[in-house]
Image (cartoon, rainbow, N blue to C red):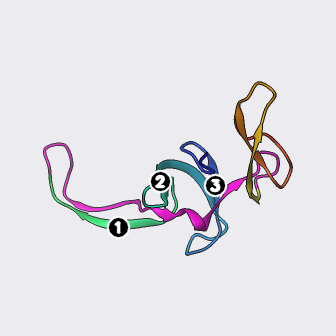
Amino acid sequence: MNKIKKGDTVVVLAGKDKGRSGEVIQVKPKEDRAVVRGINMVRRHQKQTASQEAGIVAKEASIHLSNLALADPQDGKATRVGVKVLDDGRKVRIAKRSGAQIDG
């Protein structure tokens, strides 16, 4: 079971955006990386296309999963993630910090 999924709110643990939080837009499990909205912004030169103007565009670059931690649903601080099996057999993620259920 993946500890970080698309749509989760995460806290950055290391790098130039340390301490900031944002929503996960995309997860790349084979590369162990994720793209987080507003985090790790880079500027790229963009060629002109039929739909887009040429110029320098700012966009999010991926960040390694080891530099991210899930935000606790109760207080928003970084927490580790555990997995709990419910009575009906479903697996759900829980926050180790508060014990709160993250999904389901």
Q: Residue 20 location, x and y as percent?
A: 64, 63
Disc 1, SS: strand
Characterize the local packing of mark 2: few (<14), some (14-19) or many (20 or more) Cα atoms within 10 angstroms: few
Disc 3, SS: strand
Question: Residue at horizontal 64%, vertical 55%?
Answer: 10
Taking the image as drawn, is residue 47 in sight? yes
Instruction: Please name whichever residue, 24 or 102, is drawn nearer the observer in this view of the structure.
Output: 102
Identified by mark 2, the residue type is Pro
Q: Residue 93 location, x and y as percent?
A: 72, 43
User: Could you tell me how many numbered marks the image carries?
Assistant: 3
Disc 2, SS: loop
Is 31 above or below relative to 53?
below
Gap in Å between the C-alphas at discs 1 and 3? 23 Å
- Reading the image, the residue beneath label 3 is 10
Instruction: Please name whichever residue, 87 or 72, is drawn nearer the observer in this view of the structure.
Output: 87
- What number is the disc on residue 55? none
Characterize the local packing of mark 1: few (<14), some (14-19) or many (20 or more) Cα atoms within 10 angstroms: few
Q: Upstream in the sequence, badge 2 or badge 3?
A: 3
Labels 2, 3: front one: 2
Q: Upstream in the sequence, badge 2 or badge 1?
A: 2
Instruction: Please give the range of residues in magenta.
Output: 49-76
* Residue 52 falls inside the magenta stretch: yes
Assess whether mark 3 and mark 2 are in contact (beta carbons under 8 angstroms): no
Identified by mark 1, the residue type is Arg
- Reading the image, the residue beneath label 2 is 29
- Reading the image, the residue beneath label 1 is 43
Q: Residue 52 location, x and y as percent?
A: 21, 48
Identified by mark 3, the residue type is Val
Taking the image as drawn, is residue 104 in sight? no
